[in-house]
Image (cartoon, helix red, strand yellow):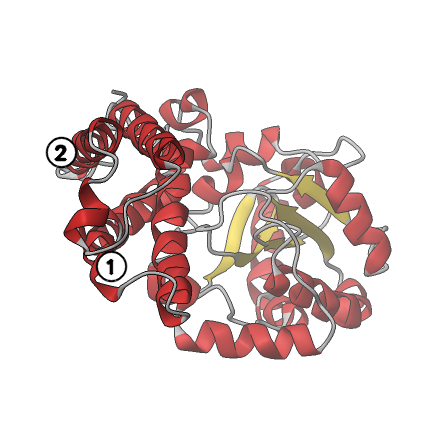
Amino acid sequence: MHQDQHEYLRWGKACLWGAGLYNLLWGGLVIAFPQLFFRWAGMEPLNHWPIWQCLGMVIGLYGFAYLLAATDYRRHWPIVLVGLVGKIAGPIGFLWSAARGEIPWAFGVMIVTNDLIWWIPFGMLLWDAAKHPGRFVPTSSRDNALTLHQAMALSVDQNGRSLVELSTARPVVILALRHAGCTFCREALADLAAERAAIESAGFQIAVVTMSRGDSLAQLARRYELEGISWISDREQILYRAFELPRGTFAQLFGPRIWRRAWQALMRGHGLGKLDGDGFQLPGILVVSRGQVLKVHRHAHAAERISPARFALESATSVAALTRQTDAML
Protein backbone atom coordinates (compact mmCIF):
# COMPACT_ATOMS: atom_id res chain seq x y z
CA MET A 1 0.00 0.00 0.00
CA HIS A 2 1.36 3.41 -0.94
CA GLN A 3 2.05 5.48 2.13
CA ASP A 4 2.47 9.27 2.07
CA GLN A 5 2.12 12.23 4.37
CA HIS A 6 -1.58 11.49 4.85
CA GLU A 7 -2.07 8.51 7.16
CA TYR A 8 -4.68 5.97 6.17
CA LEU A 9 -7.50 5.36 8.63
CA ARG A 10 -6.12 2.64 10.86
CA TRP A 11 -9.37 0.73 11.03
CA GLY A 12 -10.08 0.95 7.29
CA LYS A 13 -8.39 -2.29 6.31
CA ALA A 14 -9.99 -4.24 9.17
CA CYS A 15 -13.40 -2.80 8.29
CA LEU A 16 -13.23 -3.98 4.70
CA TRP A 17 -11.81 -7.35 5.72
CA GLY A 18 -14.78 -7.72 8.06
CA ALA A 19 -17.23 -6.70 5.33
CA GLY A 20 -15.60 -9.10 2.89
CA LEU A 21 -15.66 -12.09 5.22
CA TYR A 22 -19.23 -11.31 6.30
CA ASN A 23 -20.39 -11.21 2.68
CA LEU A 24 -18.62 -14.47 1.89
CA LEU A 25 -20.24 -16.14 4.89
CA TRP A 26 -23.71 -14.75 4.17
CA GLY A 27 -23.50 -15.61 0.49
CA GLY A 28 -22.26 -19.10 1.30
CA LEU A 29 -25.19 -19.73 3.67
CA VAL A 30 -27.69 -18.58 1.04
CA ILE A 31 -26.15 -20.85 -1.58
CA ALA A 32 -25.89 -23.88 0.72
CA PHE A 33 -29.20 -23.37 2.57
CA PRO A 34 -31.47 -21.25 0.35
CA GLN A 35 -34.56 -21.72 2.55
CA LEU A 36 -32.86 -20.96 5.88
CA PHE A 37 -33.70 -17.25 6.22
CA PHE A 38 -37.24 -17.68 4.96
CA ARG A 39 -37.99 -20.37 7.53
CA TRP A 40 -36.48 -18.21 10.27
CA ALA A 41 -38.76 -15.32 9.28
CA GLY A 42 -41.84 -17.57 9.17
CA MET A 43 -42.30 -17.18 5.42
CA GLU A 44 -43.44 -19.70 2.85
CA PRO A 45 -40.56 -21.66 1.28
CA LEU A 46 -39.40 -20.33 -2.05
CA ASN A 47 -40.62 -22.12 -5.15
CA HIS A 48 -37.80 -20.74 -7.26
CA TRP A 49 -34.99 -20.92 -4.75
CA PRO A 50 -32.15 -20.91 -7.39
CA ILE A 51 -32.89 -17.19 -7.88
CA TRP A 52 -32.15 -16.62 -4.18
CA GLN A 53 -28.97 -18.64 -4.56
CA CYS A 54 -27.91 -16.36 -7.42
CA LEU A 55 -28.31 -13.41 -5.06
CA GLY A 56 -26.11 -15.24 -2.57
CA MET A 57 -23.49 -15.64 -5.26
CA VAL A 58 -23.58 -11.89 -6.02
CA ILE A 59 -23.25 -11.06 -2.32
CA GLY A 60 -20.30 -13.43 -2.10
CA LEU A 61 -18.63 -11.74 -5.05
CA TYR A 62 -19.01 -8.43 -3.23
CA GLY A 63 -17.06 -10.09 -0.42
CA PHE A 64 -14.10 -10.74 -2.71
CA ALA A 65 -14.33 -7.13 -3.93
CA TYR A 66 -14.19 -5.79 -0.37
CA LEU A 67 -11.13 -7.92 0.33
CA LEU A 68 -9.46 -6.36 -2.71
CA ALA A 69 -10.46 -2.86 -1.56
CA ALA A 70 -8.94 -3.61 1.86
CA THR A 71 -5.47 -3.59 0.26
CA ASP A 72 -5.85 0.15 -0.49
CA TYR A 73 -9.31 1.63 -0.01
CA ARG A 74 -8.23 4.98 -1.47
CA ARG A 75 -7.19 3.41 -4.72
CA HIS A 76 -10.21 1.09 -4.82
CA TRP A 77 -12.74 3.65 -3.61
CA PRO A 78 -15.25 2.80 -6.43
CA ILE A 79 -15.73 -0.62 -4.83
CA VAL A 80 -16.56 1.01 -1.50
CA LEU A 81 -18.90 3.46 -3.24
CA VAL A 82 -20.80 0.74 -5.09
CA GLY A 83 -21.04 -1.22 -1.85
CA LEU A 84 -22.44 1.76 0.05
CA VAL A 85 -24.99 2.50 -2.67
CA GLY A 86 -26.16 -1.11 -2.50
CA LYS A 87 -26.38 -0.96 1.28
CA ILE A 88 -28.56 2.14 1.04
CA ALA A 89 -30.75 0.80 -1.76
CA GLY A 90 -31.34 -2.53 0.05
CA PRO A 91 -33.13 -1.05 3.08
CA ILE A 92 -35.17 1.23 0.83
CA GLY A 93 -36.34 -1.76 -1.18
CA PHE A 94 -37.13 -3.68 2.00
CA LEU A 95 -39.19 -0.82 3.47
CA TRP A 96 -41.15 -0.52 0.23
CA SER A 97 -41.96 -4.23 0.10
CA ALA A 98 -42.68 -4.59 3.83
CA ALA A 99 -45.00 -1.55 3.81
CA ARG A 100 -47.00 -3.19 1.03
CA GLY A 101 -47.22 -6.44 2.98
CA GLU A 102 -45.18 -8.40 0.47
CA ILE A 103 -42.63 -9.59 3.06
CA PRO A 104 -42.82 -9.71 6.88
CA TRP A 105 -41.09 -7.02 8.94
CA ALA A 106 -39.14 -9.76 10.75
CA PHE A 107 -37.18 -10.31 7.55
CA GLY A 108 -35.72 -6.83 8.05
CA VAL A 109 -33.48 -7.98 10.90
CA MET A 110 -30.96 -8.97 8.24
CA ILE A 111 -30.88 -5.36 7.06
CA VAL A 112 -29.10 -4.36 10.26
CA THR A 113 -26.03 -6.53 9.74
CA ASN A 114 -26.18 -6.60 5.94
CA ASP A 115 -26.51 -2.88 5.43
CA LEU A 116 -27.10 -0.41 8.26
CA ILE A 117 -24.00 -1.04 10.35
CA TRP A 118 -21.80 -0.37 7.31
CA TRP A 119 -23.19 3.04 6.40
CA ILE A 120 -21.00 5.11 8.72
CA PRO A 121 -17.68 3.27 8.24
CA PHE A 122 -18.09 3.05 4.46
CA GLY A 123 -19.04 6.72 4.37
CA MET A 124 -15.95 7.63 6.40
CA LEU A 125 -13.71 5.60 4.11
CA LEU A 126 -15.14 7.34 1.07
CA TRP A 127 -14.71 10.73 2.71
CA ASP A 128 -11.08 9.98 3.48
CA ALA A 129 -10.49 8.71 -0.07
CA ALA A 130 -12.15 11.78 -1.58
CA LYS A 131 -10.11 14.31 0.37
CA HIS A 132 -6.83 12.48 -0.23
CA PRO A 133 -4.77 14.51 -2.72
CA GLY A 134 -3.33 11.39 -4.31
CA ARG A 135 -6.59 10.80 -6.14
CA PHE A 136 -6.04 13.95 -8.17
CA VAL A 137 -2.40 14.96 -7.97
CA PRO A 138 0.28 12.73 -9.53
CA THR A 139 2.81 11.37 -7.08
CA SER A 140 5.66 13.00 -8.98
CA SER A 141 4.13 16.43 -8.44
CA ARG A 142 3.60 15.86 -4.74
CA ASP A 143 7.08 14.54 -4.17
CA ASN A 144 8.83 17.38 -6.02
CA ALA A 145 7.62 20.54 -4.31
CA LEU A 146 8.25 23.71 -6.30
CA THR A 147 9.15 27.15 -5.04
CA LEU A 148 6.67 29.93 -5.64
CA HIS A 149 8.78 31.38 -8.46
CA GLN A 150 9.19 27.97 -10.10
CA ALA A 151 5.47 27.29 -9.92
CA MET A 152 4.62 30.64 -11.50
CA ALA A 153 7.29 30.16 -14.17
CA LEU A 154 5.84 26.77 -15.15
CA SER A 155 2.22 27.95 -15.16
CA VAL A 156 1.34 29.36 -18.58
CA ASP A 157 -1.87 30.79 -19.99
CA GLN A 158 -3.60 30.00 -23.28
CA ASN A 159 -1.09 32.21 -25.10
CA GLY A 160 1.98 30.54 -23.62
CA ARG A 161 2.81 33.35 -21.19
CA SER A 162 3.87 32.39 -17.68
CA LEU A 163 2.69 34.14 -14.55
CA VAL A 164 6.22 35.43 -14.04
CA GLU A 165 6.16 37.05 -17.50
CA LEU A 166 2.71 38.50 -16.96
CA SER A 167 3.54 39.95 -13.56
CA THR A 168 6.79 41.47 -14.86
CA ALA A 169 4.87 43.46 -17.45
CA ARG A 170 2.04 44.56 -15.16
CA PRO A 171 0.62 43.53 -11.79
CA VAL A 172 -1.78 40.60 -12.04
CA VAL A 173 -4.96 39.88 -10.11
CA ILE A 174 -5.14 36.08 -9.90
CA LEU A 175 -8.40 34.32 -9.15
CA ALA A 176 -7.49 30.78 -8.11
CA LEU A 177 -10.92 29.20 -8.40
CA ARG A 178 -11.95 25.59 -8.03
CA HIS A 179 -13.18 23.98 -11.27
CA ALA A 180 -15.58 24.69 -14.11
CA GLY A 181 -18.36 22.62 -12.58
CA CYS A 182 -18.41 24.56 -9.30
CA THR A 183 -21.36 26.91 -8.86
CA PHE A 184 -19.25 29.33 -6.83
CA CYS A 185 -16.56 29.31 -9.53
CA ARG A 186 -19.16 30.44 -12.05
CA GLU A 187 -20.51 33.06 -9.67
CA ALA A 188 -16.99 34.43 -9.16
CA LEU A 189 -16.51 34.68 -12.93
CA ALA A 190 -19.75 36.62 -13.27
CA ASP A 191 -18.52 39.02 -10.58
CA LEU A 192 -15.19 39.30 -12.38
CA ALA A 193 -16.89 40.11 -15.69
CA ALA A 194 -18.89 42.87 -14.01
CA GLU A 195 -15.75 44.39 -12.45
CA ARG A 196 -13.28 43.71 -15.24
CA ALA A 197 -13.25 47.28 -16.57
CA ALA A 198 -12.51 48.71 -13.12
CA ILE A 199 -9.65 46.27 -12.56
CA GLU A 200 -8.00 46.88 -15.92
CA SER A 201 -8.43 50.66 -15.74
CA ALA A 202 -6.51 50.55 -12.44
CA GLY A 203 -3.55 49.06 -14.31
CA PHE A 204 -3.98 45.38 -13.44
CA GLN A 205 -4.04 42.31 -15.65
CA ILE A 206 -6.36 39.42 -14.82
CA ALA A 207 -5.55 35.72 -14.66
CA VAL A 208 -7.95 32.93 -13.75
CA VAL A 209 -6.54 29.65 -12.46
CA THR A 210 -8.72 26.55 -12.18
CA MET A 211 -8.22 22.80 -12.10
CA SER A 212 -10.32 22.30 -15.24
CA ARG A 213 -9.02 21.44 -18.69
CA GLY A 214 -8.26 24.00 -21.36
CA ASP A 215 -11.41 23.32 -23.38
CA SER A 216 -13.55 23.92 -20.30
CA LEU A 217 -11.75 27.20 -19.69
CA ALA A 218 -12.41 28.32 -23.25
CA GLN A 219 -16.12 27.65 -22.75
CA LEU A 220 -16.13 29.65 -19.54
CA ALA A 221 -14.31 32.52 -21.24
CA ARG A 222 -16.98 32.68 -23.94
CA ARG A 223 -19.87 32.29 -21.53
CA TYR A 224 -18.74 35.12 -19.25
CA GLU A 225 -17.22 37.27 -22.02
CA LEU A 226 -13.74 37.03 -20.52
CA GLU A 227 -11.78 35.96 -23.61
CA GLY A 228 -9.18 38.71 -23.31
CA ILE A 229 -7.79 37.67 -19.93
CA SER A 230 -5.29 34.93 -19.06
CA TRP A 231 -6.62 31.45 -18.32
CA ILE A 232 -4.41 28.84 -16.65
CA SER A 233 -5.29 25.16 -16.27
CA ASP A 234 -3.60 23.82 -13.13
CA ARG A 235 -4.61 20.17 -13.22
CA GLU A 236 -1.78 19.13 -10.91
CA GLN A 237 -2.54 21.93 -8.41
CA ILE A 238 1.01 23.29 -8.60
CA LEU A 239 -0.10 26.88 -8.03
CA TYR A 240 -2.60 25.99 -5.34
CA ARG A 241 0.16 24.44 -3.28
CA ALA A 242 2.64 27.20 -4.08
CA PHE A 243 0.08 29.81 -2.99
CA GLU A 244 -0.64 27.68 0.10
CA LEU A 245 -4.35 27.50 -0.60
CA PRO A 246 -5.79 24.90 1.79
CA ARG A 247 -8.18 22.05 1.18
CA GLY A 248 -11.51 22.37 2.94
CA THR A 249 -13.00 20.62 5.92
CA PHE A 250 -16.52 19.20 5.88
CA ALA A 251 -17.93 22.43 7.36
CA GLN A 252 -16.05 24.58 4.83
CA LEU A 253 -17.40 22.54 1.93
CA PHE A 254 -20.80 21.27 3.02
CA GLY A 255 -21.84 23.35 6.03
CA PRO A 256 -25.27 25.07 6.28
CA ARG A 257 -24.01 28.39 4.93
CA ILE A 258 -22.56 26.60 1.90
CA TRP A 259 -25.94 25.13 1.00
CA ARG A 260 -27.64 28.49 1.54
CA ARG A 261 -25.17 30.29 -0.70
CA ALA A 262 -25.32 27.49 -3.29
CA TRP A 263 -29.08 27.91 -3.52
CA GLN A 264 -28.67 31.65 -4.02
CA ALA A 265 -26.05 31.14 -6.74
CA LEU A 266 -28.19 28.56 -8.52
CA MET A 267 -31.15 30.91 -8.47
CA ARG A 268 -28.99 33.52 -10.19
CA GLY A 269 -28.48 31.09 -13.04
CA HIS A 270 -24.89 30.03 -12.43
CA GLY A 271 -25.70 26.33 -12.68
CA LEU A 272 -23.84 23.25 -11.55
CA GLY A 273 -21.52 21.01 -13.55
CA LYS A 274 -19.57 17.82 -13.06
CA LEU A 275 -16.65 17.61 -10.69
CA ASP A 276 -13.51 18.34 -12.69
CA GLY A 277 -10.69 18.40 -10.17
CA ASP A 278 -10.10 18.19 -6.46
CA GLY A 279 -13.50 18.91 -4.93
CA PHE A 280 -11.88 19.65 -1.57
CA GLN A 281 -9.70 22.49 -2.84
CA LEU A 282 -10.59 25.94 -1.51
CA PRO A 283 -10.17 29.01 -3.74
CA GLY A 284 -8.21 32.20 -3.21
CA ILE A 285 -7.41 35.56 -4.76
CA LEU A 286 -3.97 37.15 -5.07
CA VAL A 287 -2.13 40.14 -6.47
CA VAL A 288 1.28 39.36 -7.98
CA SER A 289 3.75 41.93 -9.27
CA ARG A 290 7.21 41.28 -10.68
CA GLY A 291 7.10 37.68 -9.51
CA GLN A 292 6.17 38.53 -5.93
CA VAL A 293 2.87 37.91 -4.15
CA LEU A 294 1.88 41.25 -2.65
CA LYS A 295 -1.55 40.38 -1.34
CA VAL A 296 -3.36 37.10 -0.83
CA HIS A 297 -6.74 36.05 0.52
CA ARG A 298 -7.38 32.39 1.22
CA HIS A 299 -11.09 31.71 1.29
CA ALA A 300 -12.53 30.72 4.65
CA HIS A 301 -15.03 28.42 2.93
CA ALA A 302 -16.00 27.38 -0.58
CA ALA A 303 -18.86 29.89 -0.85
CA GLU A 304 -17.01 33.03 0.29
CA ARG A 305 -17.60 35.89 -2.15
CA ILE A 306 -14.84 38.45 -2.71
CA SER A 307 -14.92 41.55 -4.91
CA PRO A 308 -11.86 41.24 -7.20
CA ALA A 309 -11.90 44.96 -8.03
CA ARG A 310 -11.88 46.01 -4.39
CA PHE A 311 -9.18 43.48 -3.61
CA ALA A 312 -7.01 44.81 -6.44
CA LEU A 313 -7.45 48.45 -5.49
CA GLU A 314 -6.56 47.69 -1.87
CA SER A 315 -3.18 46.41 -3.08
CA ALA A 316 -2.39 49.44 -5.27
CA THR A 317 -0.18 51.02 -2.60
CA SER A 318 1.90 47.85 -2.26
CA VAL A 319 2.27 47.59 -6.03
CA ALA A 320 3.46 51.20 -6.27
CA ALA A 321 5.98 50.69 -3.46
CA LEU A 322 7.41 47.55 -5.09
CA THR A 323 7.67 49.34 -8.43
CA ARG A 324 9.63 52.22 -6.88
CA GLN A 325 11.89 49.81 -5.02
CA THR A 326 12.73 47.66 -8.03
CA ASP A 327 13.16 50.66 -10.31
CA ALA A 328 15.60 52.18 -7.81
CA MET A 329 17.68 49.02 -7.91
CA LEU A 330 18.02 49.08 -11.68
Most foreground residue, 180 or 29 = 29
Instruction: Rate crowding at label 1 as few (under 14), some (14 to 19) or many (20 or more) other CA atoms within 10 Å.
Output: some
Q: Secondary structure at mark 2?
A: helix
Query: Of marks 1 and 2, which one's residue comes earlier in the chain?
Result: 2
Point out residue 153 in the picture as x, y percentages from the top left corner.
60, 31
Point out residue 126 in the picture as x, y percentages from the top left corner.
34, 45
Point out residue 166 in the picture as x, y percentages from the top left corner.
71, 42
Circle 1 residue: 108
Circle 2 residue: 14
Residue visible at 58% across and 67% down in the picture? 317
Q: How many marks?
A: 2
Mark 1: amino acid: Gly
Can residue 300 be seen in this snapshot? no
Mark 2: amino acid: Ala
Point out residue 208 in the picture as x, y percentages from the top left corner.
67, 51
Quadrant where the N terminus sits is top left
Most foreground residue, 255 or 228 = 255
Residue 4 lies left or right of residue 51; in this view the side is left
Residue visible at 26% across and 28% down in the picture? 31
